Image (cartoon, rainbow, N blue to C red):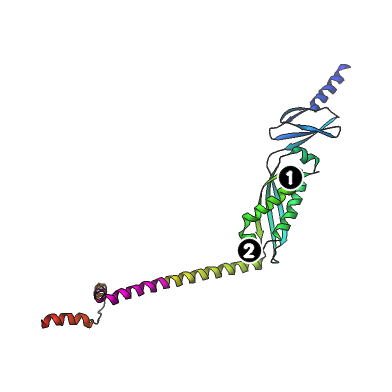
């Protein structure tokens, strides 16, 4: 009976000293509070009461940045939210250099988002989204590198505008469409006038072209039998027949 409690204690100690780390996990080991190495993946043995392990995942983490109130450089108030993709590339520094890397990265992302977008005008914020994303990624990656964090991507998701600004943008877009329509119509009128001018020059050089066009017009009119049309005959065409009769 005396050996049974000892066996139980030994099993408990052995069980607590064995840790299993998945392929995407690493264990930061502290011995008497001092860093002694990074282990994993696989089976890890710890000395109970002496060694302590911090389990760290090296997979990509998706972090949602809550909506931030931003005043752009042209004094327009908007709400902007974003999403950040990052992962732990150095488990040692992620444990030793920052208390809570997830919370620290989230707070840094919020302040950086307000700071960077506050330097942009509204038109740039709506049109140059890729450039702003890259700028955010570079700034965040620079600040999180000492924490062992690699920021792979930053994406600004939504830009919520006030109602009056949405109406102003809609009016601007409508005015732009009307301008384009007028420009296209004017270009069409110009091309048509240019073609008519070229045709007039050709007819002026060759009078027979005018007569052929006249005969073609008569042919088109003759296809409609529902009405009677009196069409004047050019004098040049009549003189041609008069000359033949005189001869």
- In-image side of 195 versus 99 (left or right): left
State which quarter of the image contains the C terminus: bottom left
Q: Position of residue 45 (x, y in %)?
A: 78, 26
Give the image quarter of residue 77: bottom right
- In-image side of 238 versus 20 (left or right): left
Instruction: Indicate whether 68 appears above or below 193.
Output: above
Q: Position of residue 208 (x, y in %)?
A: 24, 75
Give the image quarter of residue 34: top right
Give the image quarter of residue 58: top right
Which residue is at the front of the view, 14 or 246?
Answer: 246
Q: Residue at x 85, y 23 (%)?
A: 9
Instruction: Indicate whether 204 appears above or below 58.
Output: below
State which quarter of the image contains the N terminus: top right
Of badges 1 and 2, nearer the viewer stands 1
Q: Position of residue 194 (x, y in %)?
A: 38, 73
| Residue carrying label 1 | 145
Q: Residue at x 42, y 73 (%)?
A: 190
Give, as a single range, the part of the protein colored magenta: 189-212
Instruction: Indicate whether 231 appears above or below 14.
Output: below
Q: Residue at x 69, y 45 (%)?
A: 86
Q: Earlier in the sequence, mark 1 or mark 2?
A: 2
Identify the residue at the far left of this view. 247
Asked which secondary structure carries label 1, the reply is helix
**Residue 63 is inside the magenta segment:** no
| Residue carrying label 2 | 123
Please report contact status of discs 1 and 2: CB closer than 8 Å, yes or no: no
Asked which secondary structure carries label 2, the reply is helix
Identify the residue at the far front of this view. 205
């Amino acid at each position: 009976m005396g050996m049974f409690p000892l066996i139980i204690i030994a099993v408990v100690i052995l069980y607590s000293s064995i840790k299993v780390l998945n392929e995407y996990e690493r264990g930061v080991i502290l011995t008497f509070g001092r860093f002694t190495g990074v282990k994993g993946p696989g089976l890890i043995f710890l000395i109970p009461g002496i060694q302590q392990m911090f389990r760290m995942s090296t997979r990509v983490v998706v972090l949602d940045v809550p909506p931030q109130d931003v005043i752009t450089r042209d004094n327009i108030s908007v709400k902007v939210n974003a999403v950040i993709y990052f992962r732990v590339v150095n488990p040692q520094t992620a444990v030793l250099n920052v208390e809570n890397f997830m919370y620290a990265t989230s707070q840094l992302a919020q302040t950086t988002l307000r700071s960077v977008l506050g330097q942009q005008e509204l038109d740039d914020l709506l049109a140059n989204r890729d450039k702003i994303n890259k700028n955010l990624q570079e700034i965040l990656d620079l600040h999180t590198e000492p924490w062992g964090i690699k920021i792979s991507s930053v994406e600004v998701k939504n830009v919520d505008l006030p109602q009056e600004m949405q109406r102003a943008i809609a009016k601007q877009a409508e005015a732009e469409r009307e301008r384009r329509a007028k420009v296209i119509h004017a270009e069409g009128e110009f091309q048509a006038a240019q073609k008519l001018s070229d045709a007039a020059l050709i007819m002026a050089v060759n009078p027979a072209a005018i007569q052929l066009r006249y005969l073609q017009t008569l042919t088109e009119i003759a296809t409609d039998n529902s009405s009677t049309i009196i069409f004047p005959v050019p004098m040049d065409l009549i003189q041609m027949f008069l000359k033949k009769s005189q001869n």
